[in-house]
Amino acid sequence: MGNFKVYRAFDEFLKDPNISLRAKGFLTMVLTNNITTGFEVEKYCSDSKEDIKDALLELRIAKYIRYNSETNMLEANAVPYDKWNEEEYEL
């Protein structure tokens, strides 16, 4: 699993009825705890690697996480990536 480039702006994902509580929890962990790999979350929860992969897939489908082929990293944000503005959200 790749590294993350994290953007921070807490708005939409916590109120999005289209993503599960598990996916919201995963994204919250990534955005608030300087987690740079998907499986670092495993240290802080009882979910299996398969559960974590499922949460990642759900967030990719909902456009909260995307793969950047130039940097070979997953990028995460609290808003769907079709609304990202790099100047506003990049750390």
Image (spheres, rainbow, N blue to C red):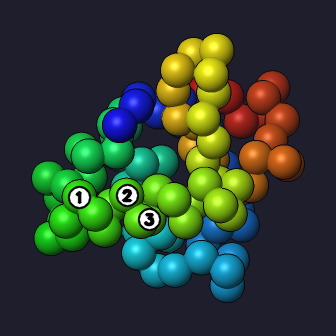
Q: Residue at x 14, y 53 (%)?
A: 43
Note whether 34 is above or below 58 in the view shown.
above
* Quadrant in which the C terminus appears: top right
Where residue 59 sits, quadrant-wise, is bottom right
Instruction: List x then y, in percent, for residue 4.
Output: 47, 33
Q: Residue furthest top?
A: 70
Q: Are marks 2 and 3 in contact (CB under 8 Å)?
A: yes
Q: Nearer the viewer, residue 41 or 33?
A: 41
Q: Nearer the viewer, residue 32 or 47?
A: 47
Instruction: List x then y, in percent, for residue 41.
Output: 26, 52
The residue that label 2 is drawn on is 53
Q: CA distance from mark 1 to mark 3?
A: 10 Å
Of the two numbered discs 1 and 3 on the same chain, state the one appearing first in sequence.
Answer: 1
Q: CA distance from mark 1 to mark 2?
A: 6 Å
Residue type, mark 3 in image: Ala
The residue that label 1 is drawn on is 49
Q: Are marks 1 and 2 in contact (CB under 8 Å)?
A: yes
The residue that label 3 is drawn on is 55
Note whether 11 is above or below 88 in the view shown.
below
Note whether 69 is above or below 54 in the view shown.
above
Mark 3: which secondary structure? helix
Where residue 3 sits, quadrant-wise, is top left
Residue type, mark 2 in image: Lys
- Does any portion of residue 78 appear in the rendered image? no
Mark 1: which secondary structure? helix
Note whether 47 is above or below 57 in the view shown.
below
